[in-house]
Structures are given as C-alpha cells and as structure tokens.
Image: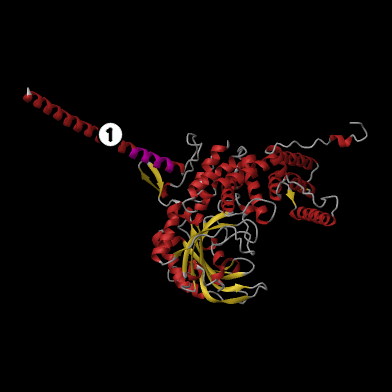
Amino acid sequence: RARRQAAHAGQQRGAGRQADRRMSQSEAALQARVEELEKAVAERDQRIRDLEREVPQGLGNRKTGRLALNTHTMQQEDGEKVLEWPAHKVRETFFKFFEEKCGHTFWRSSPVVPHNDPTLLFTNAGMNQFKPLFLGQCDPSLEMAKLKRAHNTQKCIRAGGKHNDLEDVGKDVYHHTFFEMLGNWSFGDYFKKEAIDFAWELLTQVYKLPEERLYVTYFQGNDGVPADDEAKQLWLRYLPESRVLPFDAKDNFWEMGDTGPCGPCSEVHFDRIGGRDAASLVNMDDPDVLEIWNLVFIQFNRKPDSSLERLPACHVDTGMGFERLTSTLQNVNSNYDTDIFTPLFRAIEGFSDVGPYQGRVGKADEGNVDMAYRVVADHIRTLSFAIADGAYPNKDGRGYVLRRVLRRAVRYGQDVLKMPSGSFAKLVAVLVRNMKDTFPELGEKEKEIYEVILDEEETFARTLQRGIERFTKEVSKLKESGETKVPASLTFFLYEAMGFPFDLTELMAEEHGLEVSREDFEARLQQHVEKSRNARKAGGDDEPQGIRKLEAKETAYLEDTAKLVPTEHSQVYTWHEDV
C-alpha cells in the first residue's frame, strides 16, 4: 500500500509539472500574442498619424481630388507616390548644411509680432531680430551677443506697412502674406566670398539644381554708392558673365525699412523652364524666372535723414524663400502646388461645393474659384501665426490689418467657395498638424487660435450677406444710370455700418467692372474720425463722454451669448399717447 501511495503521489507530481509546463507554454504564447497585437496597434496608430498629416479630421471618408503634381519629383514606394523633396526635408537639409558643414548656430525664429520694435508692423525679414548685432548695440550679457554665425527659418508677414503683399495674394501663384524665410547670417565673421561659396554649394551640390538654369545679379551702383564689383568677380568663378547681371538700387540694394541696416545684395534666380537664355527675364516678374535667394552684404545704416553711415563691422544677411525653393525642388510651377498648401486645399475642397483647386489665374479662373482657394489657404496661415505670437484682429494698427485679412478670407470662402460659416476656423487644425513640429507654438496655442478666428468669422458672417445684398442692389442702380464709379458714400456706409474693409468693396466693384476711389473713401473716413474726436473732446451728442459705443461684435455677443433682449424703444415715437 505504501508503495502504491508513493507511486500515486509521484504520478500526481509529474502531472502537476506537466500542467505547469503546459501553463507556462500557454502563458508564453499568450504573451507573444499580446506583444504581436501591441505592435500591430502601434503600427496602425503610426499609420493614422501619417494620414492625419494629409487628411483633415472629418474628411477621411470623403473622396477629394488630389492635385496633379509633376511625377518627375516623385518616386514609387510601397505602391504610393512620395515626393523626393517634401517640404520638411527641404527645410531640414538647409539646417543640416549650415549647422554641420558651415558651423552656424540654430537661432529660433522671432515672433511675427515685433513687440519691441516700433518701426515694424510685422516681422517681414529674418534679420529683424538681429538689428542690435548689426548696429553694434546688443547687450553683451545676452546670449545673442555671442553669435558669430547663425541660421534658421523666420516666420514673416507682409501685410501692411512698406512691405505689403495683401492685395496681390490670390491674383497670381507666388504672392503670400505669410511665408518662411530660410536664412544664414554672419555677424562680423565671414563676408561676401564665403556667403557666395556657401550658396553655390548648397544649391548645386546638395539640392542638385542644374547650374545652367541659375542667374545672379549684383548692385551696379548709383546715388553715390559704388558698384559691387567684388560680388560680381566672385560670381564669375561659377557662372559666365552673360548670367551675372547688374541692376540698380531698386532690385539690388536691400533695406529693411525707411531706417536701419542696409547694403548691396546679390540675388540668385532660377529658370523653371531651362534650355534657353533667360537673362532678359530676370527681375521682370516672370513666374518662370524667379528669385530664390537674396544675399545681402550689410555695410551701412540708413539714418532718419536718409543718409548712409558705415557700420562698425560688415555682416551677411541672406534670405531664401522657403515656399519658392520647395516649388523649385518639387518641379512644379507654383508655390501653391507644393505639399505646403495641398493639405489645406483638400480640406477647403471638403468644405466647399465648387470642385478641386486647379491652379488657374486671370480670365481662365472663371468665377475666381482658384483665386479664392489661394486667398483662404494663405490667410489662415497668416492669422494662425499672428495669433500664436500675440496679435489679435481688432480695429487698431496691426489688429486692423489682421481683421482685414480675416474678412477678406471669409468673404472669398463663403461668397465664392460656398464654405459654410465656421469652416474657415476649422482649417486651423489642418495647419497645426502640418506645421507644429517646426513651430511648436502653433500646437500650444491651437485652441486659442481656433476660438479667436471662429468668433471673428461668425461675427463678420452676420453682416457679410446683408452687405453683399446691399452692394448688389446699389450696383444695379448705378449700371442702370450708366455710372462707372462706386460713390464714396456707399463704400463708407459698407465700412462703417456693416464692417466691410474697403478692399472687399473694391474687389466686388472690380468684379462688376466699376471703379472705386480710395482717396474719396479715405477722405470720408478722415472726416468721420475728426468728427468723432471733436465730439469726444467737447462731450457732444455724437458720443457723450462716459458712454461707450458698442461695435457689432459686442452687441452680437450680448444677444447670442448673454441672451440679452434689445430694448423695445418703439414707444419713444408715440410720446403723445398714454401707455
């Protein structure tokens, strides 16, 4: 019995060990399966993130037309066409070249709102934040004072002030109000030779642009400033004299503003077509022969009396339009055909009912549809970056410029593209997904940007349609009477009563073949300003002291959000009756 019991116990222990082994094997298999599933989920999530960079939320299942990019710039990879030079690679290649090859320090872009520079409405060039270094006025205790060589991509806005591209955006395929400026700088370190050598190497050996399609310019001298023969001779080491071209101060003497650092410059131009002599097309606003890089040799400071004084040390300030460079490397004919803009165009198409963007301009662009695409895509960039950097649409200074930008975009979006109210603000999410890795401030301020734009968009939408209807009615009367000019009384009424910026009225008039006088409008506006100012000083009836006149945005808020009912004032007209 003892032997049988011992044998039975042994069998049980053996079975237990087998069960343990089976359990261990099962657990191992289960763990392997879990890891396999986790890996699959991670791959799926990564794929979703990749798709989100291209497809805006809410449009994933909607069929949208894709722009036909030039297939020469694409390569086949896993059945999908991939750009050889996507925008992020263009930017990172520039950074890597100047940091690793040329010993430059990366210096983050300054805000587009120059809060500490009263001479600028917006940051319009990469060198703005380095003015103290160029002028020899930088505080030695600051980190910036240690810089000898720097590079970055600078956020720039050109809308208002001396550099203003607002009126041109949309009409062609290369103007923008917001753009990036790739730049490299020398602060009293290297000068013309090194700057030219760096530019030639990056363009021809790194980006592989064909040398035979490059042209350069130099300052020919005027107004007492000698020609920049040094730059000319340096370029002749790389190019024949027929492609090293002289130009006057208008094109080849760079100035940031009415005052400040300045000097002669050399521009690099690229012929998109090739196989021809395009020298006569340089600086002629030909979209196929475009400037891609400007090398500024800062030697002077422009004083308030317009005279020039030599700076304590010579500096280099270069600026290469990121959007133009990207279009060149992707071998497309427009900045708007690059992957910088195509995600926005797909989103806009999803919100509208007018079909995909086709890149048309002028008379070929029936109904100004493609112009509207460009306006909306450009302006959402300008507004998003400005708000992220602390500027907001309002009625004063740069805020008024931003309000004009927003209302111009909303008008084109709703009136031309038939986008519903609120859809313009939704483009913020698309922009942030594509730009936040380079500019993290967009991601940090995304909610605020969206809310500010949405509030302004909805406020303007309330008056937009009424304004268009009023304008159309008045225009019909003008045409019936044979008039060819919109009176200032109408343009001012739309501005004051309905919040229409003058340029919106101007655009609508242009579409109807009518003229509008900006001078007459501004004279009427000045009269209104003076009248209001005098009334405030005198405590007159127009605007009594201590009483604030609410704008449309504020009264709309009281009605829609605070749910306040407007005062019933009809009884003031029946004063003679008992109530």
Q: Quadrant of the N terminus?
A: top left
Q: Residue at x 43, y 71 (%)?
A: 237
Q: Position of residue 198 (x, y in %)?
A: 43, 67
Residue at label 1?
30
Does residue 484 appear anywhere in the picture?
A: no
> Which element type, helix, strand or loop, lies under badge 1?
helix
Q: Position of residue 551 (x, y in %)?
A: 73, 46
Amino acid type assigned to the residue bearing label 1 in the image: Leu
Would you say 467 lies left or right of 102 here? right
Q: Which residues are magenta?
A: 38-49
Q: Is 435 a magenta residue? A: no
Among the 4 quarters of the image, the one containing residue 552: top right
Q: Looking at the image, is 442 positioned above or below residue 319?
A: above
In this figure, what is the number of numbered marks?
A: 1
Q: Is 46 a magenta residue? A: yes
Would you say 560 lies left or right of 18 here? right
Front-most of residues 113 and 365: 113
Prevalent SS, magenta region: helix
